[in-house]
Each structure stands twice: as structure tokens, then as C-alpha cells.
Image: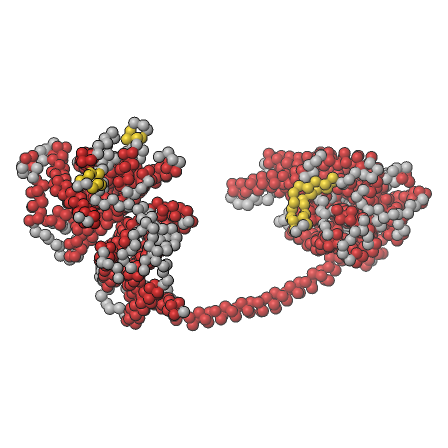
Amino acid sequence: MNQLWLIPFLPLAGFLLNGLVALVASSARAENESGADHPGAPLPYAQRLFHGIVGVGSVGLAAVLSFAALVPYALGSMRAPEGLAPIVQTVYTWMAAGDYTVDVAFRLDALSALMLSFVTFVGTLIHVYSVGYMQKEEGYGRYFSYLNLFMFAMLTLVLADSLPLLFVGWEGVGLCSYLLIGYYYDKDFCAAAGKKAFIANRVGDFGMVLGIFGVFALFGTADFSFVELAKRQVLAGNAPLGVYAVCLLLFLGACGKSAQVPLHVWLPDAMAGPTPVSALIHAATMVTAGVYLVARCSALFVLSPDALTLVAWIGAGTAIFAATIGLAQNDIKKVLAYSTVSQLGYMFLACGVGAFSAGMFHVFTHAFFKACLFLGSGSVIMSMHHEQDMRKMGGLAGRIPQTFRTMLVATLAIAGVFPLAGFFSKDMILGSAAASGHWALYAVGLFTAGLTAFYMFRLVSMTFFGKARGHGHGHGEHAHESPPTMTVPLWILAAFSVVAGLLGVPVALGGSDRIGRFLEASVAHPEIHEMSHGLEIGLMLLSVGVAVTGLAWAWRWYGKAAGPAEAVSPEAQAFHERTGALGRLVANKWNVDEGIEALVLSPFRKIGTFLWRGFDALFIDGIANASAFLVELLGDLLRFFTTGHVRNYALAFTLGFAALVAYVWMS
Amino acid sequence: MPALSGELVVFGFASLLVLAFALLMVVQKTPVRSVLSLVVTFFGLSVLAILLAAPFIAALQIFVYAGAILVLFLFVIMLLNLKEEAADKDDRPVQRTLGLLVALALGGLLAGATLRAPLPPRGTPTGTPIPMPDEIPALGRLLFSDYLLAFEVLSLLLLVAAVGALLLSKRRFE
Amino acid sequence: MSPALAAALEGAAKIAFVWGVVLGAVLPNLIWVERRMAGLIQDRPGPNRVGPFGLFQAIADILKMFMKEDVVPMYADRLLHTIAPLILLVPAMSTFAVIPFGSSIRLFDRDISLVVADVNIGILYVFALTSIGIYGLVLAGWASNNKFALMGGLRSSAQVISYELAMGIAAISVFLAAGSLRLTKVVEYQASGTFLGFLPLWNCFPQALGCMIFVVSAFAETNRLPFDHPEAEAELVAGYHTEYSAFRFGMFFMAEYLNLIAASAMMATLYFGGWSLPGLHLTGIPGGVVSIAVFAAKTGFFIFLFVWVRWTLPRFRFDQLMNLGWKVFLPLALLNLIVTGALVLWGVI
Amino acid sequence: MTGVLPGVAPMAVPPGAFLVVATLLFAIGLAGALLKRNALSIFLSIELMMNAVNLLFLTYARMRGDLAGQMIVFFVIAVAAAEAAVGLAIFVALFRAHRTVDVDKIALLKW
């Protein structure tokens, strides 16, 4: 497969096609309906079919191509002792400054191959799912064109061979996320959420851009050949400090994109978008771009241990922080959102302790079960007629069995129950944390694992067990299973969240840590002194134990909640009363939004108001008005010379000309 | 002082004609008559042009200037039915006297200046010599080589002028 | 005798010859011919009293005109009213200067080319004069202080200007083919070869369209039927010369006929080979004489055509006239010019 | 003094004479433009000035044996045609609006 560029450009083609057709169709409808196409008008079936085929088809084709590309590569590099050299294909020279050129070049190596595999695969499934999920929505074509555009940007990001090109994809996915969060732009909170996401990402991108410049300053190049240079420690700039700064800047970008504290605020609000979007962009693919970036630049990060420590602690902090918030949420999607944030924290924790391959492994597995969970929640919400409050659900296990089973599997996976995917990846993270001697981090991770298990099973229990709460039409009693276009992807994802972990069975369990060896080629590996297998297995048992405890606890508090009215058991209520202020704080998401409002936004508003009222209105306008006044004065004086008699003008003109001639003659 | 030749006689006659009728054109009160005197002036000018080895220009002078432009003037005058210039005397005497003075002064200045302007020494003409028997092909070649751009721009200008004239002379602007 | 004097004499002789023939022989007989033709076409005898076949009718008319009183209406612009006919007449008479009426003749051992002034801007000269003629009409109309006259004058000038365009552009293609503005060169070009192998290289064959345009426009230029709006009796009494009488009217009359003759001569020269006749290559005196005869014959034919058409076709409406000129002939002439230009460029012609 | 050209007979008339005629003509035209009140007459005077300039160009062309002068005259004539078309159209419109073309009666170009 020697045409890598086709992979991103197929979705682009899909985007153009869908977008154009949607535009033309909607304008046509607007015309013959004598007005803007009024909301809720379902598209004609033929057009829906077209959009579906183009949208799914383009991405599916891209997926086929990418597997055609990466499978041979993966197998080959598995056999080769050192792994294969990365495949780099230059499409054309993007910009040339002096003797330095930035090419539009695509790179296929272990890292991008891994990303490519699940991005295209999960992406395709979610496109299929969307066909079912969005069928009643208006702007069907718009939705698919955005989704295709996102796939284009994401694939560019993954395949890019240079930081500038990666940044293009980076911004592209940011844009698409903004567009899709604000998909229901006629609802205020959706538009607001979109803006919030965009601005939070800007903060990150600011660091990202500076980071790119920094990399260029350090290595004299911005394409990924700098990784090699970093491995051989060939540095141009002021080494230790420079590296530290660049790492922090790049990590700032990663934080923005991957919703790490304190830039995580946008991700929960992003749930305002359609659920498949949350699954694709805000769980499986885009938000992991930050981890990908850090893994890409791992060689650089390794050069600066301080930066790595910071990464690790930010990750760990985010993990536990988000997990605590997740405990107290009642909106099913919000819970999943915070769980995503917390899992991302895990990944950064792994990177921080130098286990980049472990981080990427978790990215990989997480993509499957989190996507599965989100899609499942989407199915639930749809069956509940767009009810998202878990307290109004309950007892759905019997009504939507397929959704229930798939979600249960995914929950066990994310909780880290042996032998599901989540277990291996999470355990690899905790193991390497312990192995690298950061026992504090390990403890945090372990505790978070417990919390994860708890809130996830809380979600499952409140949704599916007990009796149907809520009342009136369109609730539990009338819930019905979703169409196969939605359930089939659920099953596939569930299956993968079971088996995906087998890629990385640790040596201790008689496996051979394939993923680690696979990624060796492209990510750095600071030497981790091995632990004895006994200790390792012990830790595994411990984490499984913690997970099971969490599950049991959640079942005890929420699973048996019987009464039609109550969502939670008395114990839970009691516990909540006992925690008091702290509990309220947690339930209120630690007041992060309020804090940002108070510390950042309101000062900015004040400054802005001052610049407007004081500086612009008084000073600038003052100058303008003054000059205008002067000109007017001058005009009042001069206008007495304009008699309006053409002959006067002619005479004056001639006098001037005569004077000129006289002057020329004399001189 | 060159010998009195036929050419000189023609020149004297033509230039007298030109100046006389130019003056007549200015002092004339009736627009129609001033147009006519201008026509005569142009005749004289074309004679001068022939003396200056520019018969093509001479023909154009009559063909375009006298034959087209001034006829247009006549048209407009007749259309607006302009008779005698208003009998009431000029209400800006200053303008009148001053204008006269300035015109004379400038005329004198220019005459002096042109006469003092450096002229190429005898017998060393610069640029392409005028092929006496038929200068029209030479002009044509020049027009379509060195002056091509000007020529094209000119054609555009004429088009614009035609359109503009049509628009302006429409009865209503709506 | 000195060459200069000889040249002067030669020129004088030619002028005398041309004007003598035109004014003395052609013009009076033309009047007669026209009236007799009218009679013939209208199935009546026509003038047949004065002299044999009424041949002296023209002379009688002219005498009458000179004897009548010359009336100048009140409130007319005397000066202009007086000179207007002259302005019309003089150019009409000057046109003949550039028309080659014969090949060349050898007399008093000097070659005499049979054209008064062989200027290198022949055609431009002709058109310039035509455009001057307009003034005569306009001023006659304006000076008479009579609305019919004014109408006639304006009409005629509008008409002449309009058709001058089509005519000129049609003629340009001829000069493109001949490669010179000299009328002698044009004639020589037409005498030089054959068209399609069997036809003489007269411009009427390769330039058929241009020829048609030129001929029809010539009718308009000379204010002849079917384009005689300046003096459309039915509408304008007598058009621009309503207020003219006696020999001033005669001048207009003369001018019209002179223009007619000149136009015929131009057609013969531009499109029908002038004095040349295929397969006729005499030299010396007989050659010159024969060439003059040939030229006279061709011109005569066109004069006849003018008369014939006048008594055959009715008058157009003025708007029809203008539409024909601007919307049909001008584009056609331009098309013809472009095609000719292309052919010349590719060396076909 | 005369620029003698190959193929061109030496000028029997001193070129200075042409120049003087041209400048006088220009002065006359200028006087007309400044003194006349009828817009059309002013326009005519301007045409006269243009022709004076044309004469200058022709003279210099002859003196220097350079066709460029005649070329410029050609362009001047063409431009004059365009100018006349537009100018006269303006006068017609003006007359429709004010029933006069006396530039003293139409003094709109002021505050």
C-alpha cells in the first residue's frame, strides 16, 4: 500500500460531496418552502441514503486501505528484530523557507499504525451507528459531512510526518469538535458548550504552537526526524532548560486537547453534542491526540525527567479528580465524560512514569470500551426518548437487553476485571508506575481504579436494575430496543473490549507483551528495572480486588434500590449527608468553572471594559473626532474660493499654468 | 530668409486663413457661425498638415474633425436651438479683462518658449525618416507595433464614451 | 519650357478636361436622360419638345433658373443661406480630382497619367469631401428658418453620416486587398490578375458583400430614392431646399447630380476595375483613349442604375433607413472587413 | 533652420513660422475658453486649442523626421472624438435640467 495520502483524503472527498449535496438540497428546500427549511423536516429517504452511503463508504474505504497498509507493516515489524523502518511518503512541498522546507508527508510507523487501526475501525463503526441514531434528526447531511471532515483531520493528525502538518490535523479536529458540539446550534447551551471547547483548546494550542517553534529552535527541524536527533541527544539550543520548556509547552497543548486539569472543563460540556460524536471525538479518538503527541515526542520528554514527573502528577491528579466528580453525577453522559477525563489521566500517568507504550496501549483499549459505553448510553437515551437523567431510568435491563449486555461487558472492561481489555492496559500502567518506584502515583492509580469501578457500576445499576422510575409517557415502560444499525456496532465494540487486551498480555502471565515490543521502534523506553513476577502478580490481584470491591459497593448502594421513586439506597443518602460540605463540593464538580470564572474570566472582562470605555471611546475616538473637526474648519475656510463659476476655475488654472511656464522659461 | 516659393505662398495663405477664422470663431456670437468658422480653420490646418508632409493626418482632420465632430456640434446646437448669445452684457467684467490678459500673456510666453526650444541641427534628423511617397503603411506599422497598447486602450475609451453618451442623453435616469 | 510650368499646364489641362466633360456633357444630358427614363418607365413620352428628342430641355431648364428671382426668406440667416449651396457644390466638384479616368496617355513626349491628382490618400480625400458636403445640407436647412427645411437638413446629415460609416468600412476592405489608398493602385490591382482563374480580379467578385453595401450606401449618400428623405416631398415639402429658388436651387440640383456621377465613378473605380478591361492591353494614345471609354461606359452604367432605381422603388421610412444603416450594413461591413483582413493576413488575397 | 530628411524635400517654410502660428492659435483658443459664456462655444475653443497642439506635433515630427508626432496627433483626434461625444451628451442633459447652457447661470459647483 504505497498511497498513504488516500487514507485521509477519502473522507475529505466524502466531506465535500456530502456538504455540497446537503447545501444544494437545503437551499432548494428553502426555496420551495418559501422560507428557511423549518426545523424537524426529515430529509427525503433517497437523500438520507445518499449521505449515509457516502459518509460510511468513504470512511469504510479509508479503513480498508489503512488496514491494507498497516497489517503487513505490523506483521513485518513483529518478525524483524529491530522493527521495520517507518514508511514516509512525501506528497508535495508545502512551504519552503530558505533551505528549510516543510513537506506534506505522511508517515507510517508503529505508533501511527496503532492509532490508525482503531481510529479508522471505531470511526467506521460509529458512522454506521450514526446512520441509525441520526435518522430522525434534521441536518442529516451536515452531520455526516462534519463527521467525514473530522475523520480527514484526525487521520492527517495521525499520519503527519511533521509537527506543522500534525498541527493542521490538530486544529482540524478541534474545529470539527466545535462544529459538532454546537450541532444543535439553536439550543443556547449547545452553542455555549461549543465555544467553551474551542476556547479551552485555544489555550492549549497556544502552548502547542510555541512548542513547535521550540522544537524547531532545538533541532533545526520540525518533522519527526527530530525524534531520532533527540534519541541521539543532538541538540542545538540551550539543552536542559530549553528541553524542559518545550516539553511543558507541548504538554500544555496535550492538556488542552486531552482535557487534563485545569483545561478539562470543556469535555463534560461537550456532551451537548450528539452521542455518536461524544463517542467518536470526545472518547475514542480526538481526546487521545494529546497522549499520541506526548508519545510521539517521548524521546524529547525522556530528556527532561522534571517534565515527565509533572506529566505524571498532572495525569494522576486528573484521574482521581475526575473520578471523584464522576461519583456524584446523575446525567448518564456526564458520568461517562468524567470517566473519560479520568482515563486520559491514566494515560498521562503512564507517559509520566516513562511507560509510553503502556499509555498508548490504554489509549487503544479505552477506545473500544469507552466507545461501546457511549454508544450504549446513546441507545439508552434514544429508548428513553432523550431522557438523560439516570434517576428517571432503571429497570431497562429487560427492555433493551442487547444494549444492557454490551454495556455490562464494557463496564467490566473499564473497571479492569480480568481478563478483559481494561485489565491488561490499566494493569500495565499501574505495574510500570510501581516498577519505576513511584509508589505514590501507584496508590493514586489504584484508588482511582476502585472509584472507576464504583461509578461505572453505579451507572449500570441506576440505569438497568431496579424498577422503572420516572413516569408519564416516553419512559421506562415504553422503552424499546434500537435498530440493528446501532446494536451491531455495539456488539462488535463489546467483543473488542473483551479481546483487545490480548495484544498486551504481560510476560508475568505467560504472555509476551506484544504491544510493548511493537511500539519499541517508535517510542522511547527509559530503562525500568524489572520487578519480580511474583510481586507483579500480587499487584494484579490487588487491583482486581479493588475493582471488584468497587463494583460490589456500587451494587449494594444503587443496584437494589427498589422503590419506584428512589434512585439510590438509604445508605447512599446517609453517606452523602455525612460527607456534608465536601460531598456538595464534589457534586458541584469542585467548583472549577466558578473558579475559572472568578480568577480568569472576570478580570479579563474588566480589562476589556476598561479598554472599550476608557481607551477606545475616549482616546481613539477623541483623536478621530478632533481631526474631523479640524478638517471641517479648514473646509469652511476654503469653500469661499469655490464660486461655482467654471470660468473662475479655468482662469485660476490658466494663471497657474502661465506661472509654471514662466518659471520653466526663466530657469 | 528662404526664397519666395509656391509652398511659402500656400503657407502664408493657409496660416492667415487659420488665424483669421479662429479669431472669428471666438468673437462670433452665433454658435452656428462659430462652428462654421472653426470648420474653415480646420481646412487651413489640414493644408498646413499637407505642407508638413502629413497628408494622412490632413485627411483625418477633415474627415473626423470637420466631418464628424463638428457636425455633432451643429446637431446639438440645432437640437438646443441656441440663437444669439444672451444679449445682456457679461456680468463679470473682471473675469473678462483678466481672462484676455492671461490668454495673451500665456500665448506670448508659449510662443517665446517654443521658439527658444532647442531644435535638431540641420540635416541630422532623428528617429524614423518620413518616407515621402507613402507614409501611410509606415504609420500603420507603427500603430500596430509600438503604439498597440495605446491603440487598444483608445478603442476601449471610444466604446466607453459611446455608452456614456447614450446613458447621459437618455430622457430619464431610472 | 521648365518642367514645373509643364506640370502646371498638364494639371490645368486635366482639370479642364474633367470638368468640361462632367459639367458640359454629362450633367445636362443626365437631366435629360433621367426625365426621358422616367417617361419610359411611367409609359409617357417625357420631354420631347425642345430640340431633337427634347435634347435641349436641360439647357432650357438651366436658363430658366438663372433668369428667375433669387428669393431669400425673412428672418433667414442671409449669409449662411447664401453660401450653403456653394458648400454643397464645391466638394461635389472637387471629388473628381482623385478619380483615375484612364490609364495613361503619351502626348508631347511626356507620360500623362489620366488622373488629376494621384494623392496617396485618395479614398480618404473622397470621404472627407463627402463629409463636408453635409454642411451644405444642414446649413441650408438651418439657415432657411423653416421647420421643414431644418428637418430635411438634420435628416440628411444623419443619413449621410450613418451611411458614410458602412460605406467607408466596406471600402477599407478594398484597400486592404489592394494594399494602398491610392485609387490608381486600386485600379492597377484589379487589372493585375484573375479571380478563381476565369473572372477578372474586380473587387465586386471577391468583395461581393462589400460591393453590395457600398452601392446601396451610395444611394443613401447621394440622397437618391429610395433614400431621398432630405427632400421627401410627401413629408417635408422639399426638405432642405424648400426655401431656395432660382440658381441657388439649381446649385443644389447640380450638386446632387454631380454627387451621383462621382458616386458612379467611385463604384466603377473601386469595385469594377476602373478603366481596366480584361484582355485589353493597348498602349499609347489608343490605349489611353480606349481606357477612358471603358471607364465612361462603366460609370454610365451606374448612372443608369441610379436613374432606373429612382423610378422603380418607393421611399423607405426614416426609421427603416436608420435601422438598415446601423443594424444591418454596419455589422455586415465589419464582418466583411474582418474576413478580408484575415484572408490578407494569411496571404489568400 | 530645417531638419532635412532623406526622401523629404527640405522645408521651404521655416518651421518657426509653424510654431508661431500654433502658439497664436492656442492663445486664441484659450481666450475663447476663458471669455465665452456659452458652454458649447467654450468647448469649441478647447477643440481649437487641441488642434493648435496638433499642429505643434506635426511640425516637430517634420523637423525631427519622426512619425511619432503624427501618431500622437492621430490619438489626439480620436480622443477628441470621444470627448466630444460625452461632452455634448452632458450639455444636452444640462440643457434639459436648466433650459440653458450659459456657464454663468449654472453655478452648482459650490457649497
Task: Using the image as rendered, state which of residue A232 and residue C176 is in the foreground.
Answer: C176
Is C104 in front, or is A212?
C104
Q: Which residue shows up at 76% across the image and 35% down it?
A: A71
Q: What residue is shown at x 29% (from left), y 36% (from top)?
A: C189
Q: Position of residue A117 (x, y in %)?
A: 75, 38
Q: Say if residue B130 shows up in the picture.
A: yes
Residue at the far top in the pictured view: C198
Q: Is residue A446 visible?
A: no
Outermost residue, front side: C1
Residue A248 x/y as whole percent: 77, 55
From the image, which quarter does the N terminus of chain A lie in? top right
Q: Is residue A54 above or below residue D39?
A: above
Q: Give me the residue at 33% from left, 38% from top.
A: C177
Q: How is colour applied across the structure in the image? A: secondary structure
Tally of marks: 0
Q: Position of residue D36 (x, y in %)?
A: 28, 64
Q: Is residue A110 above or below residue D84?
A: above
Rendered location of residue A31, percent (x, y): 52, 42
> Is residue C55 or residue C182 the one in the foreground?
C182
- B135 vs A627, left or right, is left
From the viewer's perspective, is B169 left or right of A608?
left
Q: Quadrant of the C terminus of chain A?
A: bottom left
Q: Quadrant of residue C17?
A: top left
Taking the spot 8% from the left edge, 40% from the top edge, the residue there is C57
Q: Is residue A629 above or below residue C268?
A: below
Depth check: A360 or A295 in front? Answer: A295
